[in-house]
Amino acid sequence: MTWLITGGAGYIGAHVARAMLEAGEQVVVLDDLSSGVPERLPAGTELVRGSVLDREVLDRTLAGHGITGVVHLAGKKQVGESVQRPLHYYRENVYGLTVLLEAVAAAGVERFLFSSSAAVYGVPDVELITESTPCAPISPYGETKLAGEWLVRAAGRAHGISTACLRYFNVAGAGRPELADTGVFNVVPMFFDRLTRGEAPRIFGDDYPTPDGTCIRDYIHVSDLADAHLAVARKLTGQTENGDLTVNIGRGEGVSVRELADLVADVTGDKTPVQVEPRRPGDAAKAVSSADLISKELSWTATRSMRDMVESAWEGWCHHHPEALRS
Ligand SMILES: NC(=O)c1ccc[n+]([C@@H]2O[C@H](COP(=O)([O-])OP(=O)(O)OC[C@H]3O[C@@H](n4cnc5c(N)ncnc54)[C@H](O)[C@@H]3O)[C@@H](O)[C@H]2O)c1
């Protein structure tokens, strides 16, 4: 198999590319570098600089490298920005995927993995989110991921492609400091950012119906997520019949924002008390994945702990923000 990893110079993509290379797979990366960083890739990795919206580049890359499977991570991922720029999100995440699937079908590629998101579920009022929990996204970003899943499954059925849609829960941590997420869009880097500025980490709402009143989420280490991609890629490779797989990727364990803040204080050594702000619209009290299906289908479970995530994320943060160690 030779895998094309779109968005392979991004935070998650670079971990996936490394995991697949280390496992002996052939890998080519396609990335327009809109948020990706080529230095994240191991030396010698083939990088095609181009967009998934560019059919010509796709045709050339798929044929030129003899691609037999695609892992599609390229896309826009900021929920708030998707509310401001929905057309941009639909163009990049949905139209871009259509162009890619057309190229994949024309080239006869038979394996396709798609980065979906827990955002497809919206804010379901359930203890554990299973793959059969109804999807009701509440942001244009989540809508583009759900529409993406429909496209992937329909194209798979029509063109004989084995597909997998991976619904990531809250991704955190870094496999190496230099691979850390440099954006400040998730709660862990948001806490680090506030502490580095000498400001109190903020918690949005402490009056939710949860044991400590703060929201509960399911976090997954980015290296576990990368390993899950490899497991899915291997499963699709071994399949003799085409099929589609849609799975949650989480740990099945809820952690409250206050518990996370305590862990961040412990790891960073900065005990600045948190500041409680009003609730943000659209935040569910609890969003925890059932991890049963991926365990049953792939005999795969996450192995890294919440502490592994926070410690590795902090190392990565300090690598990119050396001033954090002086503050
Ligand atoms: N980070 C998370 O918590 C999270 C959670 C759920 C799902 N996801 C999904 O995982 C994927 C990767 O996320 P990430 O956190 O690594 O984000 P990222 O921004 O670090 O990576 C995205 C990569 O895609 C590239 N890219 C963007 N548009 C492109 C295009 N049109 N053509 C080619 N390359 C393009 C970017 O340059 C970047 O390298 C995204 O699809 C995202 O929606 C992420």
Image (cartoon, rainbow, N blue to C red):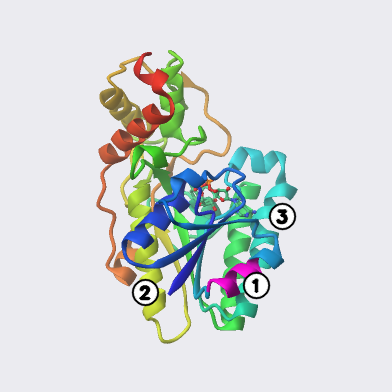
Please, what secondary structure does the residue beneath circle 2 have? helix
- Do the residues bearing badges 1 and 3 touch, measured as CB atoms within 8 Å? no
Q: Type of residue at label 1? A: Ala
Say which residue label 1 marks: 103
SS category of the residue bearing label 1: helix
Query: Residue visible at 30% across and 65% down?
Result: 295
Q: Is residue 60 magenta?
A: yes
Question: What is the quadrant of residue 53 in the picture?
Answer: bottom right
Q: From the image, tell me which residue sits under label 3.
A: 91
Q: Quadrant of the C terminus?
A: top left
Q: Residue 300 at x, y = what percent? A: 29, 63
For ligand 1, tell me if the residue under mark 2 lies within 8 Å: no
- Which quarter of the image is occupied by the N terminus? bottom left
Figure check: 63 above or below 280: below
Which segment did they paint magenta?
A: 58-65
User: Magenta span has 280?
Assistant: no
Instruction: Please state which of residues 42 and 78 is positioned toward the viewer in this rendering.
Output: 42
Q: CA distance from mark 3 to mark 2?
A: 31 Å
Say whether disc 1 or disc 2 marks the residue closer to the N-terminus.
Answer: 1
- Give the residue furthest to the bottom: 240
The residue type indicated by label 3 comes to Arg
Residue 42's disc number: none
Q: Nearer the viewer, mark 1 or mark 2?
A: 1
- Give the number of the disc on residue 235: 2
**Residue displayed at 58% across by 81% down:** 108
**In 3D space, how far apart are the residues under numbered discs 1 and 3 (Cα atoms)?**
17 Å
Q: Is residue 154 visible?
A: no
Tell me the crowding category of disc 2: few under 14, some 14 to 19, or many 20 or more residues within 10 angstroms, Cα based: some
Q: Is residue 315 above or below residue 113?
A: above
* Relative side of 162 to 80, left or right: left
Q: Earlier in the sequence, mark 1 or mark 3?
A: 3
